[in-house]
Image (cartoon, grey):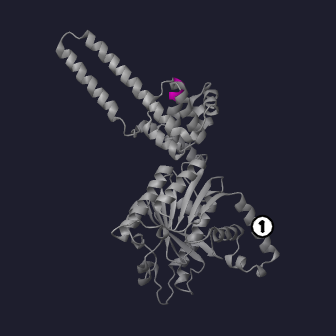
Amino acid sequence: MNAQDLEGQVIGSLLNGGASPDAYEVLSFLPEEAFSIPAYRAAYVEIKRQALTKNIIDLIMISDALGGDSFANLAEAGKNNWSSANLKGYANLVRKAWHKRKVIEIVGEAHRDIEQSRNPEQSDLIVTSLVAKLSEITADQTMIVPVHMRDLLDNYLGDLEARQNGSEHAQTVKFGMETFDKKIGGLNPTDMMILAARPSMGKTEYALSMLRGVTNDGGGALMFSMEMTSGQITERNIAGSGGLSVRKLKNPEELRDEDWARISNGVAEMTGKDIWMVDATDLSIEQIRAIAETHKRRHPHLKAIFVDYLGLIKKPKAERNDLAIGHISRNLKFMAMQLKTPVIALSQLSRKVEERTNKRPINSDLRDSGDVEQDADIIAMLYRDEYYNESSPAKGIAEVIIGKNRNGETGTIYQSFRNGHFNEIDQAEAANASAERVPSKGRYSKAEF
């Protein structure tokens, strides 16, 4: 196989496989100089630029950027590609061919210079330079190539304009939850978000609302459920989509014609969504990463990964529990960075919340390890006052407390919580209701918060 064939296979594999983990790995170690064919080199430069700035590898977008007859050439490369699964193998061969050309070029230049040298000292200097250059090539086996800032800046203004007019393709992930999305500004592709709460606050239901929202525009979602079965998650999604309480679905004798219509609508809505479930228990973080990496490779349009929940992931052997949890947290963050897909991990809050008069959670209430707080880009915590006080004026209102937001605002937003589901609510009215003081055990005023 000659250099043109190998380079064509790399370009074709990138176009056919999309922005997969393998693609980003190749982009990290294969420099543009490795391509000897000018057309392929130009295509690779544009592929790399768009992958790094837009998190997408798309034939039409790349050919538009290159202009001319590039579409036909790129389409031909994709058509002639044998298997995108061999991308890394092709890239390694292209890299080795590039190194071979460099060696031949360097040795040839040294040979000519030695022949033209006037004295032994000049020859010795040439030989020393040759050895240094060959050593540099030999050492260039780290498989990681730094990215120049101009490659990252190249399309930024265009992305900013697209973000402003709403035509941005996939720079941030939003959940179709207007108030929440506006508050956090959406998730970046490499973000890890922690959604935490005490038991019975509704964190799984809130995560399912996010999951349904992120798949509204055709994007995919992958959920690891280690607490509920896929059947239970399905039931909750149908209830959420249809606006029914789960209790009604568990008691079908209570269902009326209107309820059956809501169920039908819910099933129809969920059928059209690209949602994948893994409900295996006792999974290790390594297994979760392997499953997610394979899934992203097969489904490059995956937009978010949900893990329910952090405390149920099988802990590695460690001297202390906090070290084990820290290992899991770091790996979830690494997974988001590697797959360019945000991870939303659910977590329990510490029991020390219950010991305080003010039971609204804070970041330090995250259970078991301070590493979770450190690794997270966003921390959102749920609080429902009625759980602690039945006569609360904030009955039916949930507070979503954004305790950390690496790239945006912190603070509290409010959601309606009825029939076990979260919905939008007037923020000012909800804030006033949540601030009112009720003289009962365990209640407090906003000033105490």
Residue beneath the point at 64% across and 27% down: 72
Residue drawn at x 63%, y 67% is 230
Q: Is residue 152 above or below residue 229?
A: above
Residue 91 horizontal/vertical position (percent): 49, 35
* Crowding near the residue tagged with mark 1, few <14, some 14–19, many ≥20 C-alpha atoms within 10 Å: some
State whether residue 362 appears in this view: yes
Residue furthest to the right: 257
Residue 8 image-quadrant placement: top right
Position of residue 382 relative to residue 142, above or below, is below
Residue nearest the observer in this picture, 360 or 165:
360
Q: Is residue 40 shown in magenta?
A: yes
Q: Amino acid at mark 1?
A: Ser
Q: Which residue is mark 1?
A: 264
Magenta stretch contains residue 299: no
The single residue placed furthest to the bottom in the displayed view is: 440
Q: Position of residue 363 (x, y in %)?
A: 41, 69
Q: Main secondary structure of the magenta part?
A: helix
Q: Is residue 175 above or below residue 105?
A: below
Image: magenta residue range:
38-42
